[in-house]
Image (cartoon, rainbow, N blue to C red):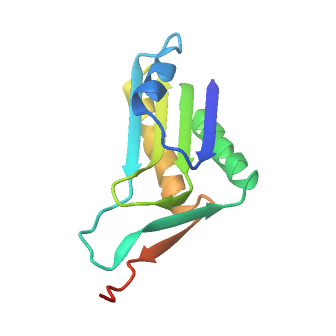
Amino acid sequence: MTVFVAVQTDDFCQASEYDELRRNAGCGAIVTFCGLVRDLQSTTLSGMTLEHYPGMTEKALKDIAYKAKSRWELGAVHIIHRVGYLKPNAQIVFVGVASAHRAAAFSACEFIMDYLKNQAPFWKKNTPLKPNTG
């Protein structure tokens, strides 16, 4: 199984990630998830800032990819998570899973996303809008 993990400030291209996942021989299913910074139509927030511990975070993401591999037969896992300041509607996370069968790909993708949402070592801080002083 190939595992690709990146924690980065730069945006990512979903099409490029999908093309990389397609290169896995024997894979008949690819499931991807792309998460966005929610735009809550709020007048109080301008975005969010995500922080992490370099090295520790990447290791945790690789560990969860290999844990998914131990549960399902997977050909490849790609995990990209952005950090830094992100505005509403910005891409924040990509998870892609390639497998011989769709059930394994769907289950593994959901498993990884649940981990990222609930346990991954990222710290989120909402950024309030600056008050209009004019």
| Residue found at the very far right of the displayed protein | 55
Q: Residue furthest left?
A: 41
Q: Looking at the picture, does residue 126 appear above or below residue 87?
A: below
Q: Position of residue 3 (x, y in %)?
A: 63, 31
Residue 102 locus on image (x, y percent): 38, 26
Q: Residue at x 55, y 40 (%)?
A: 79
Residue occupying the point 39% across, 52% down? 90
Q: How many marks?
A: 0
Residue drawn at x 61%, y 63% as measured from the top left: 51
Residue 109: percent from left, percent from top: 45, 40
- The image quarter containing residue 110 is top left
Who's the residue at 60% across and 58% down the image? 120
Looking at the image, the residue that sits furthest to the bottom is 133
Query: Where the C terminus falls, by quadrant?
Result: bottom left
Place of residue 94 in the rendered image (x, y in percent of width and height, measured from the top left): 46, 42
Q: Quadrant of the N terminus?
A: top right
Q: Going by the picture, which residue comes out furthest to the top?
A: 25
Residue 106 vertical placement versus 44 (above, below): above
